[in-house]
Amino acid sequence: MGKQDKKRILLKIGTNVLTKESDFISRGKIEDIARQIKLLEDTYEFIIVSSGAIAAAKQFVQLESKGEDINVKQALASIGQPHLMRIFQENFRELGLLTSQCLLSYSDFEKKQSRDNIVNTINILVANNYIPIINENDTVATDEIKFGDNDKLAALTAVLLKVDLLVIGTNTDGVYTKKSILSGQAETVEETSDILAIEKEIARGQSSQGTGGMQSKIKAAQIAQEAGIETWIVNGLEDQFLIKAMDKASVFTKITTL
């Protein structure tokens, strides 16, 4: 299979997945992601959108707060981002995978020049077998720290880079039906193209470490769907979560195109 025939996947990994719902970044989870990419590299090319900079910083520092909470989070992101990238780089390099860092902010998507630069740079990286690892430039941005955990960033990037599939790794088996949650027996909505219907199923609320919750994942899927991109919401806490989803060996939510 030639490079131009590879399908392009944007893999978005939330903080809860990267920490395995603890207070620290899990090297084991990052290794699990690397191993899956290695197994799939002949068929797929990957772009990663990763949260986790703030969680990475919390392993090393406790900041004195003299400003608003948002400023403390921005400072933590600044400290944690290099640590997060180092963990990715070390684990991926052991498998012969090359990584690069891209920090984006929403204003980058608003100007044509910036959009073109993102596309051209990332295409060059991917063509040279580098896996771009994208995070929001949290030091200057506030929206995603407050709400969204990079879900929207992942969707906008997926659309811009014309990916074939958006995969969002989270800490549930996709979207559960409201009825099943109320009965205490979580049941996944396995496939739908109806964004409005699936929105009605979501319980409000955010996850423990991340800032997104399921609402922002559905919004991301909607952005992707409008551009003709399918979205999978999978349980990233499972080992080999992506390969299991591809092999239909796990339960997850697939939001198909119209």
Image: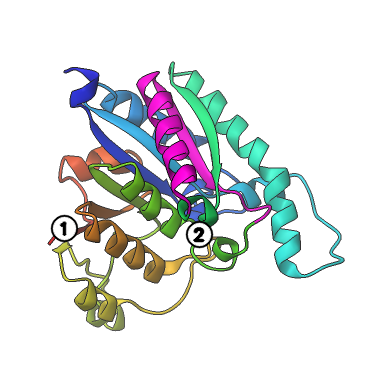
Whether residue 205 is visible here, answered yes or no, is: yes
Q: Residue furthest left?
A: 258
Residue 256 is left or right of residue 106, and the answer is left
Classify mark 1: helix, strand or loop.
loop
Identify the residue at image location x=49%, y=41%: 134
Name above or below for residue 211 compared with residue 40: below
Q: How busy is the neighbourhood of tag 1: few (under 14 within 10 Å), some, or many (20 plus)?
A: many
Residue on which disc 2 sits: 149
Classify mark 2: helix, strand or loop.
loop
Name above or below for residue 166 compared with residue 199: above
Residue on which disc 1 sits: 256
Instruction: Please tell me which of labels 2 and 1 falls first in the chain.
Output: 2
Identify the residue at image location x=67%, y=55%: 140
Q: Position of residue 62 (x, y in %)?
A: 80, 54
Is 223 magenta? The answer is no
Q: How busy is the neighbourhood of tag 2: few (under 14 within 10 Å), some, or many (20 plus)?
A: many
Query: Which of the colour schemes (rainbow, by chain, secondary structure, one colour) is used?
Result: rainbow
Q: Position of residue 87 (x, y in %)?
A: 58, 32
Is 118 magenta? The answer is yes
Residue 65 is left or right of residue 24, and the answer is right
Q: For the C terminus, which image quadrant?
A: bottom left
Q: CA distance from mark 2 to mark 1?
A: 22 Å
How many badges with numbers are in the image?
A: 2
Q: Position of residue 65 (x, y in %)?
A: 84, 64
Span shown in magenta: 111-140
Contact between labelled residues 1 and 2, with CB atoms less than 8 Å apart:
no
- Locate residue 34: give its quadrant: top left
Identify the residue at image location x=54%, y=49%: 19
Q: Position of residue 99 (x, y in %)?
A: 49, 26
The amino acid marked with disc number 2 is Asp
